[in-house]
Image (cartoon, rainbow, N blue to C red):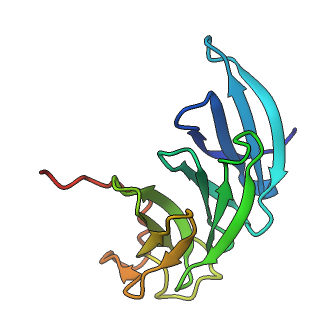
Amino acid sequence: MPNVWPAGLVSHPRLKLLYAQLANLSETIVYRWDDHARLTFVRVLPNPHSFLPCWTHANAEGTRMYSGNAGSDNVTVFDIARDPADPLEIQALRLNAPGNPWNFQIDPTGRVIFLIDMRAVRQIPAGRGNQLHALRIAADGRLTEERSSPVNIPVPVGTNPIGLAIVPEPH
């Protein structure tokens, strides 16, 4: 495949599967690996409600995979419990405010996704983006955005936050 941009590589939490987003093609690619870390192509499938899918995470149970889509201002949810090597899209959640979903993390409890969006392209209105979203993860793995979300990230105009880390609360 010439001219592809694999991004957001993530491994299945229990199986020797690797998922990546092909950002410029709005597709997801699946690989297997062996004990010597050699990759074998499994399949490529559409990420149909995405544009520039870049960031990917799988939940700890290995039942859901999430794709943050920088160009379409949404997050797609895939069922990976049914057949981990053949993810099936079950939801495309549009965010509450315009921005480019740039990076996200699942909190240690597995109940919330925190997602940074930024203003990386001119299509995002000036003064929008650069926000932190909180997406509630339901028991079935589908997402809803919290009513209080998003909140502004206090950075100067022209600054694009791209990194995100979640630090568990000490017990």
Q: Residue at x 77, y 45 (%)?
A: 86
Q: Residue at x 56, y 83 (%)?
A: 98
Q: Is residue 55 above or below residue 50?
A: above
Residue 77 position, x and y percent, is: 64, 62
Q: Residue at x 77, y 59 (%)?
A: 47
Residue 81 position, x and y percent, is: 65, 47
Residue placed furthest toward the top: 36
Q: Is residue 31 above or below residue 143?
A: above
Number of callouts:
0
Residue placed furthest toward the right: 1
Q: Is residue 20 above or below residue 71?
A: above
* Quadrant position of residue 43: top right
Q: Residue at x 36, y 81 (%)?
A: 152
* Quadrant position of residue 140: bottom right
**Considering depth in this image, is 46 or 63 the residue closer to the camera?**
63
Q: Is residue 26 left or right of residue 133?
A: right
* Quadrant position of residue 113: bottom left
Residue 127 position, x and y percent, is: 46, 88
- Can residue 85 be seen? yes
Residue 123 position, x and y percent, is: 65, 82
**Considering depth in this image, is 100 or 34 the residue closer to the camera?**
34
- Can residue 119 be seen? no
Q: Is residue 34 left or right of residue 10?
A: right
Quarter in which the N terminus is drawn: top right
**Considering depth in this image, is 130 or 166 the residue closer to the camera?**
166
Q: Is residue 66 left or right of residue 130?
A: right
